[in-house]
Amino acid sequence: MKKVELVFIPAPMVGHIVSIVELAKLLLDRDDRLSITVLVIKQPADPIANTVVQNVVSADARIRHLNLPEMEPPPEEMILKVPEIYLSAYIKSHRSQAKHAIVNNVLSSDSGESPPLAGIVFDFFCSSMVDVANDLGVPSYLFYTSGAGFLGVNHYLVIRESLGGREYTLSDTDSVVSTFASPVPARVMPTFAFNDDGYRSFVEHGKKFRETKGMIINTFAEMEPYAVKALESDPDLPPVYTVGPMLAPQKEHAGKEEIIDWLSEQPPSSVVFLCFGSQGGFEAPQIHQVATALERSGHRFLWSVRRPWSLTSSERASDFTSFDQILPAGFLERTKIRGKVCGWAPQVEVLAHSATAAFVSHCGWNSTLESIWHGVPMVTWPIYAEQQTNAFQLVKELGLAVELTVDYRRAQGSENVVMAEQIEKAIESVMEAENPVRKRAKEMGEKSREALKEGGSSFISLQRLIHDIIHNIKLC
Ligand code: UDP
């Protein structure tokens, strides 16, 4: 059988690279007609992300990757204002480099026998690459690293703008978004939607998604039935493929063994795990409130304590060299029998461990899927990106999480602190054996595994995607 080639263009971000490369692997596993080349864009502002991206794209010998030449980054002020626009603008500046790489390395080869280009699969932040696909006369496909619920918000913003809508203010009325059964309050809209430029940038992304031949989403139909149906039944949108959950593979990490050994000494389903994503960390006043809550609650805990992600500092969400400098005096000593504090956590392994009972999470989409896969109920504490909307969906629509806060957001320079009483109450609630979120999380975990098995919803959706990818080449 003749091969066909797909070009993948991921965003150079820790939380985005893993799932898109997992999709590449899954496609290669499922159909040996496919071959895949990944175009790698370097992050101008995050060397840690670049290392992660290089490691992930070179881990599978079947996937070829090409590093695009670095472009001049946009002005620093932009990253401080709305990081999402900075990244989108930087990626957009690589369009001609991407086209050049495809023309010279994918469409032509030394042997002169290149497989036909079946299309470009691009990350959310790379929607400007639709222009490259259009220029080359090949189909493009969106790979959406968040859920169907939030993809609906993206489409809603396009409609809202066409009706004269502008950036949000907190006093705006609730939004009726097709992928949410309940109206969505302005306070759970992502931070970029409150900024004029950020709002318009996301509208631009949403418009580009409509030019594609398909939207591939890292979710599964059983988890977000309402949202998936809404997208599928919208005649203005391209076909939808729910192929998830695509999860990070387990990997080695310094300190992992010590954490897993500690967990193995704890009783089954007894530990509360607190971890806030690749950019999640707090200032001292907030860390003190969490410490107080953990001390008062009496539950066992594993807590990933990290520096807050700083846009200007070189210590972006890096680990503390000593926890004594940041935790309340005597905290480590007083809680040493039942608690452990760490820096970067081996999150997937922790969630997979039988001692883990609950996950206090920033509700990043990968963390959400990982928690569900392992049947661990969540407590919502969103911080950045689209996490407020995810938290709202998890609590109000899906019943998979206990609400701690759905509208906390990181605000530069503000004292936005969640108090110990509130944290303690949410931990008590999620740890109650009778809390229905515990049962629902377990059931959804089983459904997530079923979805990927032969005959499962995501398995079938992936099959349909491959069929359509091949079919769409013939049409071009
Ligand atoms: N992660 C981890 N240890 C940490 C923090 C994060 O392993 O201490 C991993 C986590 O398992 C997930 C990813 O980093 O796979 C974070 O992705 P997510 O979409 O949840 O959040 P983001 O970092 O993009 O905000």
Image (cartoon, rainbow, N blue to C red):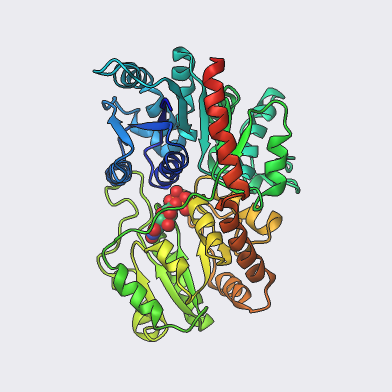
Residue drawn at 43 percent across, 61 percent down: 348
Residue drawn at 30 percent across, 46 percent down: 59
Q: Give whichever of 92, 105 is nearer the camera.
A: 105
Task: Say whether residue 59 is left or right of residue 188.
Answer: left
Q: Give whichever of 87, 165 is nearer the camera.
A: 87
Dividing the picture into quadrants, the one containing residue 126 is top left
Image coordinates of residue 471 in percent, x first then y, are: 56, 24
Image coordinates of residue 27 in percent, x first then y, are: 46, 39
Q: Is residue 429 above or below residue 189?
A: below
Q: Is residue 207 above or below residue 171?
A: above
User: Does the rendering let one see residue 448?
Assistant: yes
Residue drawn at 52 percent across, 32 percent down: 142
Dividing the picture into quadrants, the one containing residue 44 is top left
Task: Say whether residue 5 is left or right of residue 293.
Answer: left
Image coordinates of residue 459 in percent, x first then y, are: 57, 46
Task: Say whether residue 1 is left or right of residue 472.
Answer: left
Image coordinates of residue 361 in percent, x first then y, are: 51, 61
